[in-house]
Image (cartoon, helix red, strand yellow):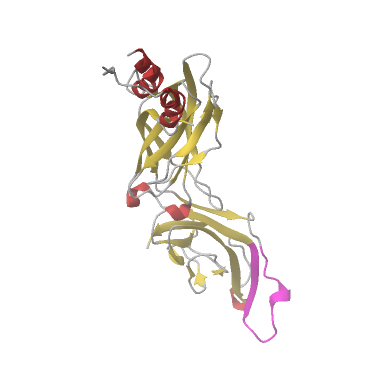
Amino acid sequence: MGSLRPRFNRPILLGIFFILPLFLAKGQTYGSASHTITVTVSTITNVTVTGGAVSFTITGANAVAGQNTMSATNQATSLQWGINSSTKKVTVQTNLTTQLFALKLVALNPTVGTAASQVTITHTAQDFLTNLGRSTGSCTLQYTAVALASQGTGTDSHTITFTIATQ
Amino acid sequence: MHKLLLLLPAVALLLSSASAQQISISGGNKTLSITTGVAGSEPAAVTNSSCTLTYKKQTAISKVTVATVCSGQSFSLSVVAVSPTKGVASPAVTLTNGMAAADFITNIPATGTTNATATLKYSASATFEQGNSAELGNDVHTITYTLVAQ
């Protein structure tokens, strides 16, 4: 009578012993852990003027014989902004309630948005740049001071304020 | 019967994943808030290093991977392992919704002490173009670290 015990093939068993653990280890997941990280971003609106104070003087050099209007321009400063909310604009106004001479401003080469046509700056805020979405950008500030010969002499000292507002 | 004992290493390997917790996070859930920015630049990035990852050595060289789920992600988030006591930290991993698991700590040896730790340093950033939470909502990441055989 032959034995009924199952017969194990020794090479196969050795193969299982050495190779199976390698297969099982490859790509095996031992465990995992999770947590939650929340990122919040506040509404941020920044605007700044670079280039410092502007001073310009209308002199006889700006006068043309036969013309009442004299003017001088300055492009030494620029405006930079950073806005992370949609549909904003920049307005401009002066602190002077009364002024001797006209001061005009236009945005040159805005990297974003739409420049308004030349603004005569008053104590009331006026649109200067519109259609500023979420962006960072800049433009050159071109000021033009205008005096009439008939207005005589004097000095206007403005504090110009740029404001980011909802459009 | 004694020959079945030869299978014990494989069985032990299978059971190892079901044994004590092999990887865990301490420090809980965190919020990173970006609140300031400079015109002409971008909002200031923020970091958080108050969470610690603890992981155990295995019977084979192993690694930790990281992945995130963040529906409607708007902003940027990355993580790097700082000062892992075992293994080698990968460069900072940018976490994006639905990403494939990325290597986070590799070459964790099967020798030495059982437990290892690493500080989780998260960095959140946003550009002005990416907007804000009031309009877009917060980014809520469920970040999963997985310990796997390398």
Relative horizontal placement of residue B76, taking residue A54 as reference (left or right): left
Q: Nearer the viewer, residue B110 or B4?
A: B4
Residue A34 location, quadrant: top left
Residue B53 placement (x, y as % from top left): 44, 25
Quadrant assignment for the N terminus of chain A: top left
Residue at 33% over, 48% down? B134
**How many discs mark residues in the rendered view?**
0
Direction bottom: furthest residue:
A66
| A31 sits left or right of B122 in the view | left
Q: Residue at x 36, y 22 (%)?
A: A8
Q: State whether residue A96 is above or below residue B83.
A: below
Q: Up-down: is A162 above or below A22?
A: below
Q: Which residues are magenta?
A: A56-76
Q: Which of the two residues, B44 or A99, is positioned nearer the viewer here?
A: B44
Residue B26's spot in the image, x, y percent? 39, 22
Residue B79 in view: no
In the picture, which quadrant includes the C terminus of chain A? bottom left
Q: Quadrant of residue A49?
A: bottom right
| Residue A75 on the magenta segment | yes
Residue located 46% across and 20% down the image: B59
Q: Position of residue A152 (x, y in %)?
A: 62, 72
**Residue furthest toward the front?**
A1
Q: Is residue A47 magenta?
A: no
Q: Nearer the viewer, residue A108 or B69?
A: B69
Image quadrant where residue A107 sits = bottom right
Q: Is residue A88 visible?
A: yes
x then y, percent, for residue A81: 51, 55
Q: Nearer the viewer, residue A100 or A3?
A: A3
